[in-house]
Amino acid sequence: MAAALRRSFSPFVKGLGASRWQQLASRQLSLSPGLCGSESPLARADAIFKVTMIPGDGVGPELMTAVKDVFKAGDIPVEFEEFHLSEVQHMASEDKLDHVLSSMKNNKVAIKGKIHTPMEYKGELASYEMKLRRKLDLFANVVHVNSLPGYSTRHNNLDLVIIREQTEGEYSSLEHESVPGVIECLKIITRDKSRRIAKFAFDYATKKGRSKVTAVHKANIMKLADGLFLQSCAEVAQLYPKIKYENIIIDNCCMQLVQNPYQFDVLVMPNLYGNIIDNLAAGLVGGAGVVPGESYSAEYAVFETGARHPFAQAVGRNIANPTAMLLSSANMLKHLNVLVLMVVCGSMFVYLCTPQVRTRDLGGYSTTGDFVHAVVENLRHRPAH
Amino acid sequence: MAAHSSLLSVFKIINPRWNGPLGNSVKIFGTTFTNHRNKTTLTPPPAKYGGRHTVTLIPGDGIGPELLSHVKEVFRFSCVPVDFEVVQVNSAMESEDDIMDAITAIRRNGVALKGNIETKHTLPPSVKSRNNVLRTTLDLYANVMHCQSLPGVQTRHKDIDIMIIRENTEGEYSSLEHESVPGVVECLKIITRNNSLRIADYAFQLAREKGRSRVTAVHKANIMKLGDGLFLQCCREVASGYPDITFDSMIVDNTTMQLVSKPQQFDVMVMPNLYGNVVSNVCAGLVGGPGLVPGANYGQDYAVFETATRNTGKSIAGKNIANPTAMLLASCMMLDHLKLYNYATLIRNAVLTTMNETRLHTADLGGQGTTLEVVQSVMRVIQSKGQLTAEF
């Protein structure tokens, strides 16, 4: 039946301007070289995708367990390679980081929780998360802020995309005390990286059929730094005559987001503003527990939550909302293009925000376990294919 | 020279408005001034995110759309990490907006796969050939075509292996014509030193890379003494820098005669635009027809892949009898350009294996197979290699 479905999809594939379903059916796979050339003549049994998994700190491990349970219930052919990298629990070292990196280079796709950065300065200015991002050159962070159907907030039917440059800006980890009592912290903006993130934003908008890209900046104050960012965005915008390009100052942007977020479509911005706007927008649709996010480099894709918080207070209490991580894992399957019906499951997670299974952050009384159980039941009783 | 350029750079910093008069001369001094110049010539970083490339697809007319959809199907089946951005170009319209959109799309993505866009003769002569506009605007100066005898295809000549490099932007295709006196038309053929040096250099570099031993320049310098004479002189100059490669030249009429009697004597050939058109079509005919040979257009920053003989195939459009080999092999060349060598060899081997089966030959090769049968056979061969495919 699945084969018949696919055969009926192929004539649609040839048509241009196909609807979303047919576009998904025609999307290609990204394949890690490790999977090429199996010994057996039949490819079926070897069609398992390997994905690196880094549970992280706080509720990360619980969320990862939720993902694994749901994948097992859905018979999804994905195998996870786990790495426990954590600065807070003193399980981080250069060796471990190297292992994680080599695994990532093999698998090209990863799913991770937040690796918490402790506040105290222990001699290293760059956190492990930043090191991971820099070594893999994960320059673009995409957070797709969607209102959940069935859960109403002060702003409903929101559909924003926030693209944040992730490797430079204020997070350059370059600080020094030139004179005792005086600290200089360097914010680095480069033309190449600004052009790259601007091009990513416009390419993303083109691919997803978006109509407007807004650059967020503070160039009235940081005339050279954010001025360069803005200039790069304007240069790249000339190659995309069909997409409207605007810019807005960060303070005005934050105010507009809470008053009238519908005016924005795709937002692109440097590192720190991105951090703030991600969290702000997540708050508009229901909090850190419901927004998925992904990070891209030219070669790799890492899937995680949109607003990155370890949520240490909830560890062991079974109250964390796994929606964000499950939606992110559905996005990962979309990226791997496993099967069309995985997207069905992805959308099904969202529908489970019915009051009976809402977790505490959305106003319900369900535990993480209950929520995962409900999703698993829904998967088991899906229509037979 | 260095002092002069540093002085110029100082001027640039002090007064950035000096772009106008100094614009053209600044070009010679190198790329330091690119940032200050016209920003629409910006070369963006490659469109590769999360391991997936984005490539512009221009379906064109005639058999283009159906063949390119077969390419998309094969890519989807073999899990190739390439996404296509489709840009339609309507050849019936007189405005140039469509083709300008396509050109901007290629500037964004860097790589394109296209079918041929028909040039209607019924439209007024001010409407230029869309393909030509694309090639000249993006400055795709080298058209490369590799003609090889395929083992499964029966032809009168065997063991042909010729690389043809054709200058793609000037020559007879400059679209400069006028009627100076009623009943008298002047058509200008432009040959420039810069472009001739560039294409000759490209030809020798390619010959060296592929381990070829001989480059032949094709010309008609006995008649067009200054025009083709300049071309020949530039080729000779470049040849002196490559002592390991033999260089000789041949007049185009002799070339075409030799091609149909003894094509095995040629190795790499370089020539201006019109001779290139003629010679490449002759060679395509020698190895089995227009449905078998892929072609590539390379520029400094962009690459566009298509069939070598650029036929629209209006008479066989929609009948499922077109030969998809050329387009599939062109897509393999595109994958090589994107450095996805594994996928390129996979699909290429599958196509060549399919070509060996005579019962699958399409009408142009004298068989009765359909396009769909050929594509399905290619996909079956790919699946039998044990690769991960989209069909479980």
Image (spheres, coloured by chain):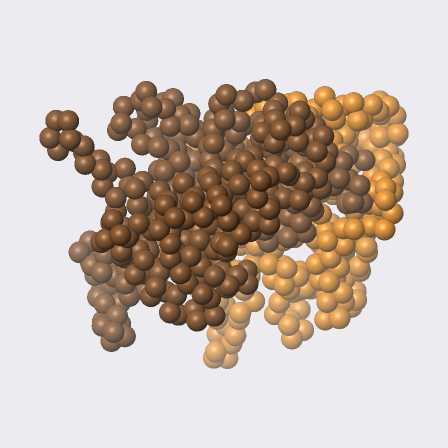
Chain colours: A orange, B brown
The part of the image, by quadrant, that contains residue A284 is top right
Q: Position of residue B60 (x, y in %)?
A: 47, 29
How many numbered tags mark residues here?
Answer: 0
- Asked if A184 appears above or below B249 in the picture, the reply is below
Image position of A86 (left or right of A161): right
Image quadrant in which the C terminus of chain B is located: top right
The part of the image, by quadrant, that contains residue B19 is bottom left
Q: Position of residue B274 (x, y in %)?
A: 35, 42
Q: Is residue B319 visible?
A: yes
Residue drawn 35% across and 51% down? Answer: B251
Q: Position of residue B33 (x, y in %)?
A: 31, 61
Q: Position of residue B218 (x, y in %)?
A: 37, 52
The part of the image, by quadrant, that contains residue A132 is bottom right
- Asked if A378 appears above or below A44 in the picture, the reply is above
Residue drawn 71% across and 62% down? Answer: A101
A298 and A65: which is toward the camera = A298
Residue drawn 38% across and 28% down? Answer: B119
Q: Is residue A157 visible?
A: no
Image quadrant in which the N terminus of chain B is located: bottom left
